[in-house]
Image: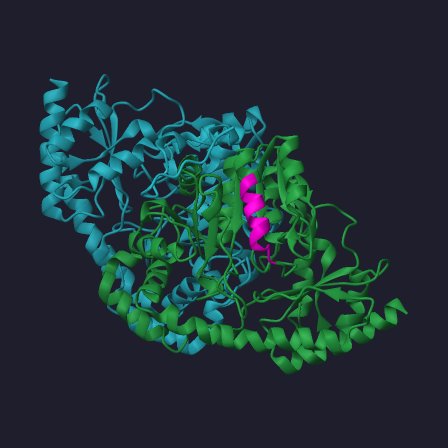
Chain colours: A green, B cyan
């Protein structure tokens, strides 16, 4: 039994800090405090060149035409944008998304589109609906940390699909599916977070065949598709296996991550359960933000604004790849993405990028040690994720030069 | 094994509708399709007087000064409102909420306030962090349906606390806590949904004493507090047991439910785990919507606008109570709330408000049969929830008169 102690100044005794620890659910232990979070906190200190985060550039946000867009939204929809709305999403937004998704070969009606509070919520919702404790979930190696954070509370066991410079190796996936009982497969096929890798068309075909052959369910998370600075768009896996794939996108990279707008198309039964789960999770996503995004696409703002974002990021990616080429030691290799927000660098065996992080911070440069992106402990200690979207070209050059100096020192 | 069948017009075979049913998590069965949802769908048909939903009146939304408020937000915060933000909430919003909560005796620093995507997400997050399958959760009888929807996926067993016209009976709660092993207690002390009941001050004191005595954790969900049309505010349970209570509020009734903004203050360890869980759930709540709400409070809009909302609802409540008095049969009793959005009517034993619903809809009036608000099946068949916030006085009178006629016919 515990007694409430309130001191004169209203502060509660520090002995209360751990109160109710005995009340936590068994699943809660799996929600580890993210080390990455601490890293990002340090990285955001003033004066630090941060190649650590995964933030879009603030100058990519459409602040200039936002008042005009908002005025249109208020005039068109009136009080409806402030009212409760359907769990599935704001109807005009779902309507416009159906057309937007068709451009990538995801042919769905408005009724087949679900809006989520960021694509993070798509991951949570699917985890909730699909994962029983101990279920197998197949993920890339490395994989997106936010997906692990979403799935972990449902207590899955991860199976790592082998990857190379072209992303997931189809034979590895085939083998895993053949072994059976995988609840679902989770992939980011374009400019993956963290590796920057893109799965080529022939591999996508092989992956689609495998999931159809084994009647598997695959989550195709596609946040970076629009951020392509070179080359041509590749077909979505959904377009090759529509009955087996949940295809998910987001407004975070083409409008604003602060609005928290994701969308997905899923097999009918999965979609129905996702909607039911979302009802209990947050009822629905902000009607107002959905209306903004609907008009952003419908009125042609997206079409006009996207080239500005692409033109902003293209030279940053170039600056990073050029600087790596110029400064990084020969013992390193790195991904050469045609888009997205990240480059993935791999150093010599024995390098520990986690240990090196403290030294990098001393020299005012931040990155994310790669090991945090692997579902198995101890893997990827010689890797690092480098973000180029949130830093100007000069700073990227300085940052990479500084890291190169540290890496050379460490591996010499 | 299943084969993908795509017909010429792109429609997929209906045999796919149930595909992946074998893939669902064991918890998913607990997420029943809400009957209420179907009821509300019917209720929202044109021409129906709906006393069914729980919607604020559209004319209560601050559409008139929204462009001005948004201009201020964009000028003050710039691109930050479109960027990723902290999981805990947009710092200026947390700051202003700390002051807002102090007015109700919830003395917290900005760091102690968590913003959630509606208070629905507070319920989901707490369920996720606290409930292991089979855990006991104590709820009012009747209780808020959205809370059951949030908790059900975590598979609790509910214990119903006895209530009378003054809400929860403290002795019943005491007995339940004495029996032990209750994970938490969930209450709406002001103008409860669905019953409209308010727990008086002396009962609040007794409840606070009980939770302290048994070191219990209590969720005080307080969405309707500001919607008081008569009488004085009562002390929050938090103010009497700050170390044992999660106090939660919302902007849904005083600004807009469409923005999905809830907030809560919780014991330190619970708060830390809530933040960690929310990271995996949706990263954070819309930065833009949080900034709007922050300025809405900070710039005095709330203070000026709230009286307009209260003046809009006060005569609607009056119209409902007067109509019930005038038209309803003597065999009925009903709650007489001083605020909120709902009145709860109880008919004679043997009445089945669920069966009567079809007849009411034929006569173009909708309500919610009360049985859906009980955690135990078969209870409350003679009860109904009547909403007065979303319908004008004349329609309320017509609706109640029509229902009265049906009730009299049914019980005669």
Q: Where is residue A368 in the image (x, y as percent from the top left)?
A: 70, 63
| B32 versus B73 height, above or below | above
- Dominant SS type (magenta): helix
- Quadrant where the C terminus of chain B is found in the figure: top left
Q: Which residue lies furthest to the bottom in this view?
A: A394
Q: Which residue is drawn at 53% across and 43% down?
A: A208
Q: Position of residue B172 (x, y in %)?
A: 45, 27
| A410 versus A207 height, above or below | below
Left or right of B360 in this view: A366: right
User: Closest to the observer: A366 or A111?
Assistant: A111
Q: In which quarter of the image is residue A2?
A: top right
Q: Is residue B146 visible?
A: yes
User: Closest to the observer: B324 or A215?
Assistant: A215
User: Closest to the observer: A2 or A305?
Assistant: A305
| B2 versus B340 height, above or below | above
Left or right of B131 in this view: B294: left
Q: Can residue A156 be seen in this view?
A: no
| A223 versus A281 height, above or below | below
User: Closest to the observer: A169 or B123?
Assistant: A169
Q: Where is residue A76 in the image (x, y as percent from the top left)?
A: 23, 64
Residue A205 highlighted magenta (yes or no): yes
Q: What stretch is highlighted in magenta?
A: A198-209
Q: Where is residue B163 in the image (x, y as percent from the top left)?
A: 37, 29
Residue A2 highlighted magenta (yes or no): no
Left or right of A35 in this view: B379: left
Q: Residue at x 35, y 43 (%)?
A: B10
């Amino acid at each position: 039994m515990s007694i409430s102690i309130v001191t004169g100044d209203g502060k509660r005794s520090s002995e209360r800090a751990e109160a109710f620890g005995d009340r936590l659910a068994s699943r809660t232990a799996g929600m580890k405090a993210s080390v990455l979070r601490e890293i990002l906190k340090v990285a955001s200190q003033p004066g630090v060149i941060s190649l650590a985060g995964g933030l879009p550039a603030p100058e990519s946000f459409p602040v200039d035409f936002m008042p005009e867009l908002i005025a249109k939204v208020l005039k068109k929809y009136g009080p409806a944008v402030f009212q409760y709305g359907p769990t599935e999403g704001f109807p005009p937004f779902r309507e416009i998304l159906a057309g937007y998704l068709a451009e990538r070969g995801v042919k769905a009606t408005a009724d087949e589109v679900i809006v989520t509070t960021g694509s993070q919520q798509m991951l949570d919702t699917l985890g909730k609906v699909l994962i029983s404790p101990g279920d197998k979930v197949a993920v890339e190696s490395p994989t997106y940390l936010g997906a692990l954070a979403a799935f972990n509370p449902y207590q899955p066991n991860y199976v790592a699909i082998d990857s190379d410079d072209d992303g997931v190796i189809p034979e590895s996936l085939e083998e895993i599916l053949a072994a059976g009982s995988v609840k679902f497969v989770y992939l980011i096929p374009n400019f993956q977070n963290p590796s920057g890798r893109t799965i080529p068309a022939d591999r996508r075909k092989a992956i689609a065949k495998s999931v159809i052959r084994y009647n598997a369910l695959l989550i195709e998370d596609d946040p970076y598709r629009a951020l392509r600075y070179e080359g041509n768009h590749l077909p979505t896996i959904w377009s090759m296996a529509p009955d087996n794939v949940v295809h998910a996108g987001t407004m975070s990279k083409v409008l604003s991550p602060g609005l928290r707008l994701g969308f997905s198309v899923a097999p009918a039964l999965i979609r129905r359960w996702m909607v039911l789960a979302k009802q209990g999770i947050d009822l629905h996503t902000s009607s107002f933000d959905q209306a903004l995004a609907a008009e952003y696409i419908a009125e042609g703002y997206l079409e006009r604004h996207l080239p500005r974002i692409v033109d902003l990021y293209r030279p940053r990616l170039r600056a990073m790849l050029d600087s790596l080429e110029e400064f990084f030691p020969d013992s390193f290799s790195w991904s050469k993405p045609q888009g997205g927000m990240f480059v993935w660098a791999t150093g010599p065996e024995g390098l520990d990028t986690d240990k090196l992080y403290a030294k990098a911070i001393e020299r005012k440069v931040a990155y994310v040690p790669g090991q945090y992106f692997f579902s198995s402990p101890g893997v990827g200690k010689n890797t690092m994720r480098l973000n180029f979207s949130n830093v100007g070209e000069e700073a990227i050059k300085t940052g990479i030069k500084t890291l190169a100096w540290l890496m050379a020192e460490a591996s010499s």
